[in-house]
Amino acid sequence: MEILYLFVLMITVIVLAYKRTPLLVAMAIMFILTVVWTELRHLFYVPGWFRFANGIAAVTLIGFSIKPLRRLLISDRLYSRFRKSLPRMSTTEREALDAGTVWWDAEIFSGRPRWKKLLKTPAPQLSEREQKFLDGPVEELCRMLNDWEIFDQHRKLPDNVWAFICEQRMLGMIIPEQYGGLEFSAQAHSAVVMKLASRNLTAAISVMVPNSLGPGELLLHYGTEQQKDHYLPRLARGEEIPCFALTSPSAGSDAASMEDVGIVCKGEHRGREVLGLRLNWNKRYITLAPVATVLGLAFQTRDPDGLLGQKTDLGISCALIPTNLPGIQIGNRHLPVGAMFQNGPTQGTDVFIPLEWVIGGQERIGQGWRMLMQSLAAGRAVSLPALGTAGGKVSALLSGAYARIRKQFNIPIGEFEGIEEPLARIGGRTYRMDAARTLTLVALDQGERPSVLSAILKYQLTESNRRCINDAMDIHGGKGVITGPGNYLAHAYQSLPISITVEGANILTRSLIIFGQGAIRAHPWLLKEMNAVSDPRPGARKAFDKALFSHVGHVVSRGVRSLVLGLTGSLATRSPVRGPTARYFREMTRMCAAFSFTSDLVLIVLGGKFKFKEKLSGRLADALIHLYLGSAVLKRYEDDDRPEEDLPFVRWAMDDSLHTIQESLRGVLENFPIPGIGRLIKWIIFPLGLPYAPPSDRLGKAVAGLLLSENESRERLTAGIYISDEDDATGRVHTAFHLVVNSARAENAVRNALKEPVTYANYRELVQKAVESGVITEEQATMVRLAQEASRAVIEGDDFPRSAIEKGPGSINFAKNPANPAGRQARPGNPG
């Protein structure tokens, strides 16, 4: 009987905490229960300790409800300690932290995501005008691009390609129509970059950069009307080629160390003395710098003579500078690995510019870093994620096709389990990448600027691209290793470090930014607490008290939810949908609660020291990343009207994400600063053990099967990339794949009837015998012959005259190759 009452008390407390009942309501409930149990003791046995425990709970809640009392005893005493424990932040760190908005990341940190809110978000779509542009000019540009010729012979974009890009206003996709731009949505901007990247990275980056973080974006949001009227039409038409110079030898991720400086002074401009800036800079790794006509420049601003006021160090500013001014050095090139886009250094010595050339004018002096971070909060979710998704889609399309075309032991290599594994990883990751990309773009088009989610997208989609292309290289074997015009993977493989490194190196993004910034910006109470202790006004202590006790309630509630959901296998929560994905919604809710609870306790224990615990931050970032990616996968499946044939992609992505979240949290708890607390938290969030396993072999086989055949799921997965129908490297793969798939039944019939597999060496003889014996028709025979010939054309590796290779880059010109006078493909060698 005593145990029953203990159970009742526990259930009462758990329910109140699980529902996160408001303090006054919980107090009233416990007070009423105390009175009721006291009266019921006359009817049946009610233990005295039980009534006493209910009363103590009610009195405790009453005490917490009296704000002056709890402030006196608790929050005012913690106020000073909390203030001292906060880590010091530089101005650049503070401005980066304040940049952008929060969106679905706030729901994840709440520990109780509102799935219906996510499902009400519009599905991604392009306007008729945007789709027409993709099907017209972008498609035409892709046909103009020859990846091998651009890399090995031209070593730049050909002039006719540049002219076409400018003519079609592709450098002005983000510029409003009133200035002559295309004014595309974020969805369309990303779609253009993705399609170009699937054909040629050099062209994609050349189009991407002027539409990303640079002069155009900064002018739109911060430029004066005079600056907009002057530059935006020229940028849209391609009359001005912009670049933006931020990185210098001494300042990469640490912008505060920037040594490039502008000194406020007076100087001559257009024949008269004006107030301006004398600039000195040394920048590196600046895309489009060698061909730029206008230079966006970030620099430290100093006013030693007090010409603008009493402050000497004014902070980072941004200016637009014509590159033909005296003192500017520009034009030399760096050579990025795997791509030939224009990139190089620039230096400036005693370059004088008027203050009106500062972006936004004099009033924006010192606001440059804030402007850059606000722009990056949105832009980082568009360009590099589009490149990453393109790599995944190309890997899925071509690796599946090649694995079906290429045979060993008279079996397509895609049927070997060793090949099924990387094919499954490519398929599942690509589905997840595209889901996250399009969901985030919807948020951007709704006016959000989700800085944490954009960092997640940049990091995860470039990392996933790296893994997809590595898997694709393993599947292709020798075909991927030998470079030449027939190799469609080599340049993508070589260029992987580019997107990994730029716009925030991935190591930095994972270990410092994603969780470090997310925990402050997206947490429901932490930023409010920080703002309260930083506020010198008298009412700050009241604000701190409210935030503190709300935070305590949040932690207790998420701990209880984690335990209850763990004990019930997530059945204690509801899914917003029915069907095959309902379980995943429930499991994601459980993991959101576990993540929220764990991250709060880590922050409570470490306080300001957490800033230097990059390994823990990285593991928590991994969990946060996959909570967002999993949300995107579930939303994508609903947006596509739940096609049952796509379920292998969905299940693989979700199983992989849930397992990653679990292992990330386990890694945090096993390395918790206080080991005993780590073990306790692990028991709370995983009370019945570790529930999630990686995707099964059976599921991987189903995903691989979708990539090895022609079907609608494969088409949806790879939608949006360029599909060549020409006699080029990828066009030959598509042709051969189609022929192999459609001739498979006839080839099997020949094999079964004649008891001999069809190979390139014997296909003519066997096919003729099969036709003569009535096994297959002449039409089927033609299909088998074409499939064999097309497959051989794909499998062959490129080779060149030794003298051409030894002359150096650019000398391997097939039009002049005596071994290949037609100039269409290399002389056949041994199969790859």
Image (cartoon, rainbow, N blue to C red):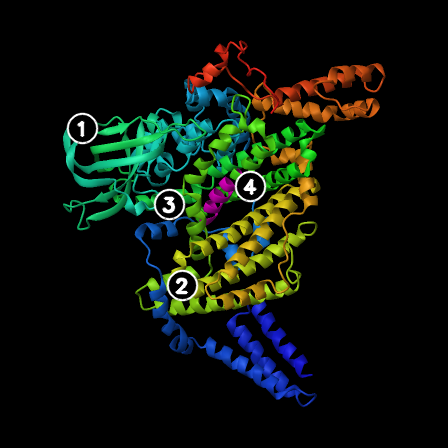
* Segment tinted magenta in the rendering: 452-465
Q: Residue 300's spot in the image, x, y percent? A: 25, 43
Disc nearest the viewer among 3 and 4: 4
* Nearer-N-terminus badge (2/4): 4
Badge 4: residue crowd in 10 Å (few <14, some 14–19, many ≥20):
many
Q: Which mark is residue 270?
A: 1
The residue to which callout 4 is attached is 433
Q: Residue 535's spot in the image, x, y percent? A: 32, 63
536 lies left or right of 447? left
SS at mark 1?
Answer: loop
Q: Residue at x 35, y 24 (%)?
A: 239
Give the camera-side residue of 151 and 767: 767
711 lies left or right of 83? right
* Nearer-N-terminus badge (1/3): 1
587 lies left or right of 66? right
Between the residue at mark 1 and the residue at mark 2, the CA separation in whole angstroms equals 56 Å
Disc nearest the viewer among 1 and 3: 3
Magenta stretch: dominant SS?
helix
Between the residue at mark 1 and the residue at mark 4, the CA separation in whole angstroms equals 52 Å
* Nearer-N-terminus badge (1/4): 1
